[in-house]
Amino acid sequence: MRSSGILLPIASLPSPYGIGDFGPGAYLFADFLHTAGQHLWQILPLNPITAGNPSPYTSTSAFAGNTYLLSPALLKDCGLLTDSDLTDAPAFPENSIAYEAAIDYKDAVFAKIPERFQRHPDAALHSRFTEFCQQNASWLDNYAMYRACERRFTAPWNQWPQDIRDRNIQSLKKIQEQLETHITAEKLLQFLFIDQWQQLKRYCNDRHILLIGDLPYFVDYYSADVWAHPDLFKLTPDKTPTVVSGVPPDYFSTTGQLWKTPVYRWKNKDTIPWWMSRFDQNAGLYDIIRLDHFRGFVNYWEIPADETTAANGTWQPGPGALLFEQLFRRHPSIKLVAEDLGIITPDVQELKQRFHLPGMKILLFAFSGDPTKDPYLPFNMEKNSVVYTGTHDNNTIRGWFENEVDASVQQRINDYTAENVTVDNVHWVFIRLALGSVADNAVIPMQDLLGLGAEARTNTPSQSIGNWRWRVTVPQLSSELERILLLLTRTYGRAWPSSRKKESTDKAAT
């Protein structure tokens, strides 16, 4: 079915606690989507973050959840927090994420949960926690130990005592006993994370809203995954990377992008099974998984670890079809989207087509050249694709039009749309292009729906500070915006039957 939806990370939702969460603001947004006839909500990764690096793409775990997305309000409702615990919350800004202050606040409040949980009278809650720990032990034990050791040693894992760094069995048993309270507390937060997320997911699914989540290709060096499974990565005997990841020089960067994450030993017999575990985890979290850096499954750019730029790297083979053959045998009905942006070679295109994976089409990349060859113009798009006005890594439509478009591109936009496109209407012009395209699915970043400028941009990849801060406010989720979006969704045939049955006699809307 033709569908449409909105891109909005959970952290960007309204909340009184400095960062969006799984609480009332999330349910308010789900109701907004439902009323506006939307059936897709893309949220980006749910992996843990730190105050110093809020990007969910460089996380301390490929499996764990970002527990700062836990809703204090819902924790109060289930008896794990009290009104007095929440009365001293700082005056957080409404329209931006205050990572440092929110993390400090939630760390202090959440520290009260383990003792409250022990005294909680609900036997079923305790039983579900035990079951969760057993079912997720393969990653949860390592992650909880990792987090507890981080606090104990106040240093990255590669600077821990050598016996702990190298995971000596006897040393791990000893420190596990010493840190048992902290380890259990970490497991409890992960249990509560999954519990709140699954409640929200059921609420959305009951309203025919599918959740699209991201699966990052690489994992961060300073992560529980690299500490627990060093043999899966190209490391030296003392656990330092020999080579790191990035992308080669191109039109946008003469030195390429140096990401510095470790790269996989794809020839290791345990690497693909570890990836299958990642897919298992994500298949339980999301209805649709977007595969970040899809071309890395065919080949990836490998750079010597001592290089200061990405220029002197080499292409190395990824797992290719072997991984996806195993994946679809394991999860025959799994739904994937391939992030196939940038320079895509025929072998990458072949892998995508072999498994019938929808790719991504970005309207901000259109209008730059020959219209007969531009794959991002609506009439050149493939039906089996997801069209976006832009992504979390792009400027907003308005910001792009104001700051990045020259006169020739603007003229091509005017000629294509037969409109006088301005700063004030460019977002609606592009939203109509997306919704009216042949692509089966269309996703609009919330900032574009609101017509916001560059100040509302989510992420600038070349910029290390100031990213991942924007938040939507409650007044911005207006009934007028719902009405307009529903009208456009019906006009372009993207409303499902449940939406078409809604009352449609509003003369103003038609």
Image (cartoon, helix red, strand yellow):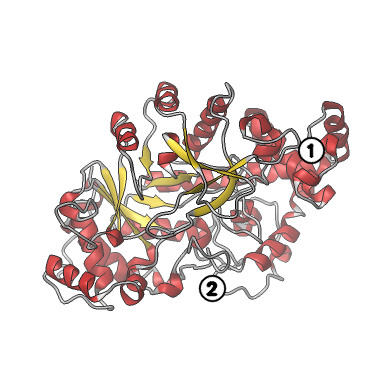
Q: Nearer the viewer, residue 66 or 268?
A: 268
Which label's residue is closer to the chain start, 1 or 2?
Answer: 2
Q: Nearer the viewer, residue 217 or 26?
A: 217
Q: Is residue 405 above or below residue 61?
A: below
Does residue 157 appear in the picture of this structure?
A: yes
Q: Residue at x 54, y 54 (%)?
A: 22
Position of 375 compared to 289: left or right? left
Residue 507: percent from left, percent from top:
14, 70
Q: Nearer the viewer, residue 60 or 250?
A: 250
Q: Quadrant of the C terminus?
A: bottom left
Residue 291: percent from left, percent from top:
43, 41
Q: Residue at x 72, y 63 (%)?
A: 104
- The amino acid pointed to by label 2 is Glu
Residue 106, located in which quarter of the rendered image? bottom right
Q: CA distance from mark 1 to mark 2?
A: 41 Å
Does residue 126 appear in the picture of this structure?
A: no
Residue 480, located in which quarter of the rendered image? bottom left
Q: Is residue 252 above or below residue 158?
A: below
Q: Is residue 240 above or below residue 442?
A: above
Residue 276: percent from left, percent from top:
51, 28
- The amino acid pointed to by label 1 is Arg
Q: Residues within 10 Å of mark 1 (few under 14, many from 20)?
A: some
Q: Nearer the viewer, residue 142 or 360?
A: 360
Q: Quadrant of the N terminus?
A: top left
Q: Residue furthest front?
A: 312
Please name the residue that numbered disc 1 is placed on.
165
Position of 356 compared to 180: left or right? left
Residue 65: percent from left, percent from top:
60, 46
Residue 188, located in which quarter of the rendered image? top right
Please name the residue that numbered disc 2 is placed on.
94
